Amino acid sequence: MTSTSGGEAIVNGLVAHGVDTVFGLPGAQIYGLFDAFHQAQLKVIGARHEQACGYMAYGYARSTGRPGVFSVVPGPGVLNAGAALLAAPARRPEGGARTRGPAET
C-alpha cells in the first residue's frame, strides 16, 4: 500500500480540477504542500504578503476563467489574506476557501 501525504492529496485534487498555477507564501506549516506542488510541476508564484497571494489568485481566475488557487500559512497568514478571500465571493458566489493546519500535514 502506498502512503500519500496530505500535501500530495491536496495537489492530486487540484490537478484533477485543472489547476496548473498556485499563488503562495510558504511557511513551515505547509512545506509538505509546497514540496507536492514542486513534484507535480505546478507553477508556483510567490508574493511578499498573504493578501497579495489572494488578490493574484482572484485576478488570475477573473482573467483566465480557470480556478485561482492560493496557499498561505494558518493563523496570521489566513487573517492577512482575509480581505482578498472575502472579495472573491462578494463578486462571484462560487468562491471558497480551504485552510490547512499542522495536524493535517
Image: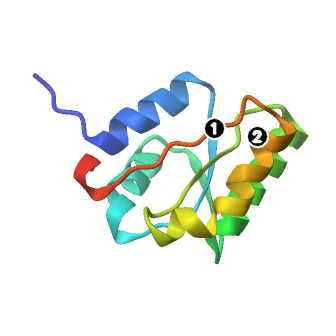
Element class at badge 2: helix
Residue at 77% x, 58% y: name it: 55
Q: Quadrant of the N terminus?
A: top left
Q: Nearer the viewer, residue 36 or 56?
A: 56
Whole-Å distance between the Cαs marked 2 and 1?
Answer: 7 Å
The amino acid type, in three-letter code, at marker 1 is Gly
Labels 2 and 1: the sequence-earlier one = 2
Decide if residue 43 is in sight here: yes
Question: Where does label 1 land, which residue?
Answer: 96
Compared to 39, does 24 lie above or below? below
Rendered image quadrant of residue 83 = bottom right
Q: Residue at x 86, y 40 (%)?
A: 91
Q: Position of residue 101 (x, y in %)?
A: 34, 54
The colouring scheme, among rainbow, by chain, secondary structure or one colour, is: rainbow
Badges 2 and 1: C-beta atoms under 8 Å apart? Answer: yes
Helix, strand or loop at mark 1 = loop
Q: Return the residue found at the far bottom.
A: 48
Is residue 25 something one can see in this rendering? no
Picture coordinates of residue 43, whole percent (x, y): 61, 50
Q: Which residue is mark 2?
A: 89
Residue farthest to the left, as pictured: 1
- The residue carrying pointer 1 sits among few (fewer than 14), some (14 to 19) or many (20 or more) residues within 10 Å by Cα, namely few
Residue 56 in which image quadrant: bottom right
Figure label count:
2
Q: Does residue 94 appear left or right of residue 76 in this picture?
A: right
The residue positioned 82% from the left and 34% from the top of the image is 92
Rendered residue at 58%/42% (across/down): 97
Picture coordinates of residue 90 (x, y %)?
82, 42
Instruction: Kindly identify the amino acid type of the residue bearing the numbered disc 2.
Output: Pro
- In the rendered view, would you say 69 is above or below 67? below
